[in-house]
Image (cartoon, helix red, strand yellow):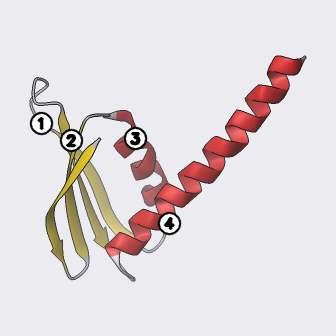
Amino acid sequence: MEIHVLKDEGNELELEIYGDKTIPYLVKSYLVDDDRVDFVAIRTGHPLEGKVYLYLRAKEGSPRELLKSAVEKAKADLILFRTAFDELQKQ
């Protein structure tokens, strides 16, 4: 996965993400639930380009910090999911 910052000004952050298209959607789902986020969207490029764009506008706080927080929440939930799945496999 490769990430490029297209815009990082004030309360706005726009990223161009190459490679995996599912992770940006996962992170977006956590950003949508954050009250400090004013707006978040994902735009897909041409299918042959293999990239998506994530746009984030913060109501309060730094967009980068909000993004980091969303990634950490997703990571914690994925760890819980993996633990539950491993327990299921033992049955």
Q: Residues within 10 Å of mark 1 (few under 14, many from 20)?
A: few
- Residue 53: percent from left, percent from top: 20, 48
Q: Earlier in the sequence, mark 2 or mark 3?
A: 3
Q: Which residue is mark 2?
A: 52
Residue 25, compared with residue 71, is above or below; it is: above
What's the distance in space between the residues labelled 4 and 3, CA to CA? Answer: 14 Å
Q: Residues within 10 Å of mark 4 (few under 14, many from 20)?
A: some
Residue furthest to the front: 2
Residue type, label 1: Gly
Q: Which residue is mark 1?
A: 45
What's the distance in space between the residues labelled 2 and 1, CA to CA? Answer: 6 Å
What's the distance in space between the residues labelled 2 and 3, CA to CA? Answer: 10 Å
Q: Quadrant of residue 59?
A: bottom left
What's the distance in space between the residues labelled 4 and 2, CA to CA? Answer: 20 Å
Q: Which residue is mark 3?
A: 23
Residue at screen point 39% across, 51% down? 28
**Residues at circles 4 and 2 in contact by the CB criterion of under 8 Å:** no
Q: Which residue is mark 4?
A: 69
Q: Earlier in the sequence, mark 4 or mark 3?
A: 3
The secondary element bearing badge 1 is classed as loop
Residue at screen point 33% across, 72% down? 63
Q: Nearest the camera: 63 or 75?
A: 75
Residue type, label 4: Ser
The secondary element bearing badge 2 is classed as strand
